[in-house]
Amino acid sequence: MNIQALKSEQASHELVTNRQELSPSPTKQKKPSTKSLSTWKRLSSVKSRSRDKDRICSDKSSTPYSWTRLISDLRKSQQFGRFSLVEYLPNFQAERLKSTVRKLMRPGQGILAADDSVHQLGIKLKTIGLTNTTTNRQRYHEMLLSADADKDIDINDFISGVLVRPETINPTESSGRAFMKMIRKSNILLGVRFDKGVEQLAGCDREYISTGFDEVQEAVKSMKEQGVSFGLFRCVYRISEWTPSRLALTENSLLLARFAMVCQRASIVPILATDVLAKGNYGYEEARGVLRDILTTLVKVMNEQHIYLAGTLLRVSACSPGLCFKDPTDLTRVADNTLKTLNESLPPAIGGILMSREEDFCSSVAILNNIQRCRIKKPVFVSFCYSRILQDGLETIWAGQNRNLRKARAVFMKRIELCSLATFGQSWSKETSIFPVWETTY
C-alpha cells in the first residue's frame, strides 16, 4: 500500500477532528411557555407529518409519482390515519332518483302492492273455482288495473305506482307483455319486489333474514331494461322479550343498505321495507322502542354505506300493539307514537315514508288518517303501500265472471279513494264514518 496515501488520509482525519473541537456547541432549544404549548405541539406535529410525507414521496424508481400511488402510500402510513375513497352518485343519476321519488310521493297517491306470488294467487283463484294458470292470473290483474272497467274514475288519480313480482312481467310470456302494455296505458310507474321470502337467522331465537340478495344485481339490470322504476326489498322483525336482537338489526340493515346501493347505481329507487310481525303480546311502548331501534340502525348503516337518502323510500309499520295484547287498540295513540318515532329516528333528507301495517282495512286507513291530522311536524310526506287490505274479498265478488267485473272494480276503487283521502287527513269526519256501507255488503 502507498505510504504517501496513508499519511494524507491521517492528516485529513486530524483536520476534521480539530474543526469539530473548535466549533461552538449547538444552543439548546428553549421549552415554550405554558401559553404557547398548544401552538408548539401543533407545529411539531405538522413538521413530523411533512417529514413523513417527504420520506413517502421520495421514490428512487424512474416512474413518475402519481396521486394513486401517493394515496396508497398514505394508507400504509400510520401517521396519516385511515383514508377512504368514496364513489358518490353522479349528479344525473341523483336527479333521476329524485324525479322518480317525486312522482311516487305525489299528494293523494300511494303504491299498490300486487306482489302476491304464484302460489298465493293460486290459493285465491282456487277459492272461486279457477285453476292457477297464466291466463287466470292475467285476468285477475286486469280486474285491478284495467282502465276499461270504470270510465268515470281513473286509477291514476289515486295510485302512483304498482309493485309486482318479476314473473308477472316476464317478457317471454304473452301475459307479461300484456301486463306491461296495460301499465303503460294507465301511466303508472312499475316496481318489482326482489326478495324471495325469509329464512331463520343462525344464532338467534326465531328471528329471520331475507333471501334473494345473491341474485339482486343481475335482476336489477334486467328489470331496468324492461322499464322498472323502483324496487322493494323486505325484511321482517319479531318482537318478544329478547327480540329483535342486535345481530338481527345489524344484519337486516346491512342487507337493505346493500340493496339500496345496487338499485341506485341502476337509477332505480329502492324501497326498504321494515315489517314488524303483528303476532305477539307486546304493548305500545315496546312497539315504539323496536321501531326506533330499527330505523336508527338502518339510517346509521345507510350513512356508512353512503346511500343517497333523497332517492330512497322507507316502508314502515305503525306502532300498534300485538294481536295478543289484552287492551283494545287506541288508533289515535298508535298514530301519535308512530309519528313521534319517525321524527326521532329519521333525517329530513329521506325521500318519503310509506305505511304498511295491515291488520284490517278500517284500522289501517284510520291510522294513516290520524297521522295526517296530527299537529306534530312530519319529517317528510307520509303515504301508503298496501296490498292485502285493498284486495281482500275482490276475488269473491269477481268470481271469474265478466259480468261481475264492474262491481268488483267499484269496491276496489272506493278503497283506494279512501286511502287517497287519508293522505290528506280527510277520510273521517263527524258526519261521515270511515266504515262505509259497501264494506259489509259482500
Image: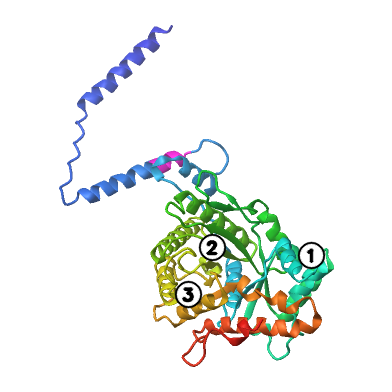
The residue singled out by tag 2 in the image is 275
Above or below, 303 relative to 2: below
Q: Is residue 113 magenta?
A: no
The residue singled out by tag 3 in the image is 380
Crowd class of label 1 (few under 14; some 14 to 19; many from 20; radius 10 Å): some
Above or below, 67 relative to 283: above
- Toward the viewer: 209 or 283? 283
Instruction: Look at the numbered disc 2 and give the secondary structure of its residue.
Output: strand
What's the magenta bit mostly, secondary-structure-wise? helix
Q: Mark 1 or mark 3: which comes first in sequence?
A: 1
Horizontal side of residue 192 vs 31, given as left or right: right
User: Which one is in front in this view, the residue at disc 1 or the one at disc 3?
Assistant: 1
Mark 3 residue type: Val
The answer to whether mark 1 and mark 3 are in CB contact below 8 A is: no
Q: Position of residue 14 (x, y in %)?
A: 28, 17
Above or below, 1 relative to 324: above
Magenta span of residues: 52-58
